Image (cartoon, rainbow, N blue to C red):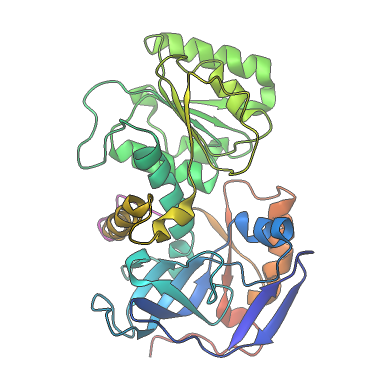
């Protein structure tokens, strides 16, 4: 099979590799479309490693391990590959644990499905596992529950808005930039949701945040910072309640010492959904099993959808350029996806 191997300088080699074989609880998927995420460039660059760094899979089941009963060859699925493990999504065939694999309905394209796994699960973990006290979608809020979402046009931010809507969490206090028109399609203005432009500068942004917090009763206790750099969390902490406030961030290893110690802070790291029995994050694995199937049901019933996406020309040959564009911050309110059949030497996908 063809596989894209990403170098620390983001050059990509397309190599011939053997088709992976599933372990007992794994699924091998014929990749129709691979998604991408900022971590796909960060991991090779920052860790100085050479690897197939893709994790978002959309395709059809090729083979299952002997303990897998939920899936069979030919099923349309999306899946979250275990980060740093062999069998990533930048290849004709990829591997995922069965519990981070989910069915996708016929009306959902593989392109759309490939935008969901990592980013949507990050949003779900942040809202419901790291921020303590927010209601789950099947027990929606019945009282005002202000929530700041910083980076609302990012894939994680946009999925956080979708999930917050299902949980009836309002008002949503969203911060975005170029992607504001997209965020407008997600929020509910009639429920008090607002969107502010960080490009107006920190002073103006903080002023507007304080104004809407006062209008919401003078207290906001929850914040999801999907940016976690360039002063995002310090802006949030200017308005977050200093005694009961909580903030979750998405970039591990950063210096968050500017956050007051009285504010409860956490880091949302989506890799914890692949935690093993006996680890402290085991609950994230169980949560992930449930939420991935929740996403599949939402796609089937129409109350959940993927992120806007751009198909990168050339299939795997386009991975390097797309990762460089991600590194340079060129993507706004869009995810780059790769059709495997567009790769030279790869057969066209057929449902027959």
Question: Is residue 142 rendered to the left or right of residue 131?
Answer: left
Q: Locate the N terminus by quadrant.
A: bottom right
Q: Is residue 116 visible?
A: no
Above or below, comparing residue 109 to residue 188 in the picture:
below
The one of 212 and 101 positioned closer to us in this rendering: 101
Above or below, comparing residue 84 to residue 125 in the picture:
below
Above or below, comparing residue 31 to residue 306 in the picture:
below
Q: Quadrant of residue 63?
A: bottom left
Q: Is residue 303 magenta?
A: yes
Q: State the image coordinates of residue 217 (x, y, percent, origin top left).
A: 37, 9
Q: Quadrant of residue 130?
A: top left
Above or below, comparing residue 219 to residue 89 in the picture:
above
The one of 234 and 92 positioned closer to us in this rendering: 234
Main SS of the magenta part reads loop
Q: Quadrant of residue 89?
A: bottom right
Q: State the image coordinates of residue 177 (x, y, percent, origin top left).
A: 62, 34
Q: Is residue 82 visible?
A: yes
Q: How many marks?
A: 0
Q: Locate the C terminus by quadrant.
A: bottom left
The single residue placed furthest to the front in the displayed view is 278
Q: State the image coordinates of residue 240 (x, y, percent, origin top left).
A: 48, 18
Residue at x 29% of width, y 40% of height: 166
Query: Start and end of the magenta stretch?
Result: 300-305
Residue at x 49% of width, y 41% of height: 157
Q: Is residue 314 magenta?
A: no
Residue at x 38% of width, y 42% of height: 162
Q: State the image coordinates of residue 199 (x, y, percent, origin top left).
A: 68, 27
Residue at x 72% of width, y 67% of height: 320
């Amino acid at each position: 099979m063809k596989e894209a191997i990403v170098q620390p300088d983001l050059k990509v080699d397309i190599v011939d590799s053997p088709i992976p074989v599933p372990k007992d609880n794994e699924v091998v998927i014929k990749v129709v479309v691979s998604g991408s995420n900022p971590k796909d460039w960060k991991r090779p660059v920052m860790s100085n490693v050479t690897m197939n760094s893709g994790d978002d899979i959309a395709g059809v089941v090729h083979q299952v391990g002997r303990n897998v009963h939920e899936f069979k060859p030919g099923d349309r699925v999306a899946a979250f590959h275990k980060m740093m493990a062999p069998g990533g999504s930048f290849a004709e065939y990829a591997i995922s644990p069965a519990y981070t694999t989910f069915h996708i309905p016929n009306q959902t394209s593989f392109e759309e499905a490939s935008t969901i796994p990592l980013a949507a699960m990050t949003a779900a973990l942040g809202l419901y596992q790291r921020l303590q006290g927010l209601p789950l979608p099947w027990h929606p809020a019945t009282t005002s529950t202000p929530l700041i979402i910083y980076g609302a046009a990012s894939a994680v931010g946009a999925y956080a808005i979708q999930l917050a809507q299902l949980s009836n969490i309002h008002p949503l206090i969203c911060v975005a930039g170029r992607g504001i028109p997209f965020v407008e399609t997600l929020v509910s203005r009639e429920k008090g949701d607002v969107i502010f432009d960080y490009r107006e500068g920190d002073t103006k942004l903080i002023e507007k945040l304080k104004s809407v917090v006062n209008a919401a009763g003078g207290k906001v206790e929850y914040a999801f910072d999907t940016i976690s750099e360039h002063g995002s969390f310090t802006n949030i902490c200017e308005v977050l309640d200093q005694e009961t406030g909580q903030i979750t961030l998405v970039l591990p290893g950063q210096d968050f010492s500017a956050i007051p110690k009285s504010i409860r802070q956490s880091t949302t790291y989506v890799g914890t959904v692949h935690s093993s029995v006996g680890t402290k994050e085991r609950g994230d694995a169980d949560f992930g099993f449930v939420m991935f199937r929740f996403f599949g049901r939402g796609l089937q019933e129409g109350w959940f959808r993927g992120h806007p996406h751009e198909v990168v020309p050339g299939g795997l040959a386009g991975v390097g350029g797309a990762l460089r564009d991600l590194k340079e911050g060129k993507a706004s309110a869009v995810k780059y996806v790769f059709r495997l059949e567009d790769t030279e030497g790869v057969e066209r996908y057929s449902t027959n």
